[in-house]
Amino acid sequence: MIRKAVKSDLAAVAGIYDEIHTAEECGQLMIGWLRGVYPVRATAEAALNRGDLFVLEKEGIIAGAAIINQIQVDVYYGAPWKHEAGDDQVCVLHTLVISPRFAGKGLGKEFVGFYEAYAVSHRCTELRIDTNEKNHTARAMYQSLGYEEIGIVPTVFNGIPGVGLVLLEKWLGG
């Protein structure tokens, strides 16, 4: 079940962030995030306060989370998107996380499916996602779901310097 997060979900979401940081520090994952920089509990709190934090619950356990909104990061503007779309037509998936304990069970794809349905229900025709160029797992998943990489932009991403930010899009328009 995927639903809007509530305040009592924050500890679980922050816990998933910590699990991912630990797995990356141990060399089990390559995401390109930094503990204490991004994502942190305040990332989830800000999204909860905006009303755009969603959680994926399996058997009573928060197994994943993501932020879904129409807020485009600054490097999106001026990027070579294949489809022109006004801000009101764009839906963005941010900070999709699945607990490493639930890896390989298709939950990331399930969350992207939810995101796409959410975008359609909000009359968005352009889907945009970004990920660190080091995150080959996410890049492969997004491409398998029909997202096209339109470029890699060098940037400081949420306080992390030297990020090659992969921009992906999927057009739902006619």
Image (spheres, rainbow, N blue to C red):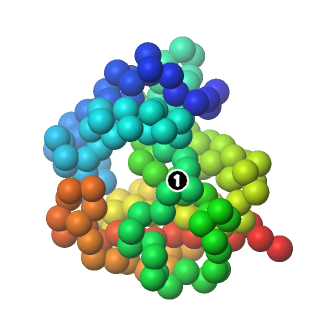
Q: Position of residue 115 (x, y in %)?
A: 63, 48
Q: Nearer the viewer, residue 60 or 102?
A: 60
Q: Position of residue 23 (x, y in %)?
A: 24, 40
Q: Is residue 137 left or right of residue 17?
A: right
Q: Nearer the viewer, residue 142 or 3?
A: 3
Residue drawn where x is 38% and y is 38% of the image: 46
Which residue reaches farthest right? 174
Task: Name which residue lies at 23% across and 66% down.
Answer: 156
Residue denoted by label 1: 93
Taking 124 as reference, is 13 left or right? left
In the rendered image, the quadrant that contains the N terminus is top right
Q: Position of residue 88 (x, y in %)?
A: 65, 62
- Number of numbered discs visible in the structure rendering: 1
Q: Quadrant of residue 103?
A: top left
Q: Is residue 9 above or below residue 27?
A: above
Q: Which quadrant is home to the C terminus?
A: bottom right
Label 1 amino acid? Leu
Residue at (28%, 61%) from the top-left corner? Answer: 157
Q: Is residue 146 above or below residue 97?
A: below
- Is disc 1 surrounded by few (<14), some (14 to 19) or many (20+) residues within 10 Å? many
157 on left or right of 98: left
Is disc 1 placed on a helix, strand or loop?
Answer: strand
* 136 versus 80 height, above or below: above
Residue 108 location (% of width, % of height): 53, 44
Q: Nearer the viewer, residue 34 or 137?
A: 34
Residue at (50% x, 75% y) in the render: 149
Do we see residue 109 in this rendering? no
Question: Is residue 112 shown to the viewer in this render?
Answer: yes
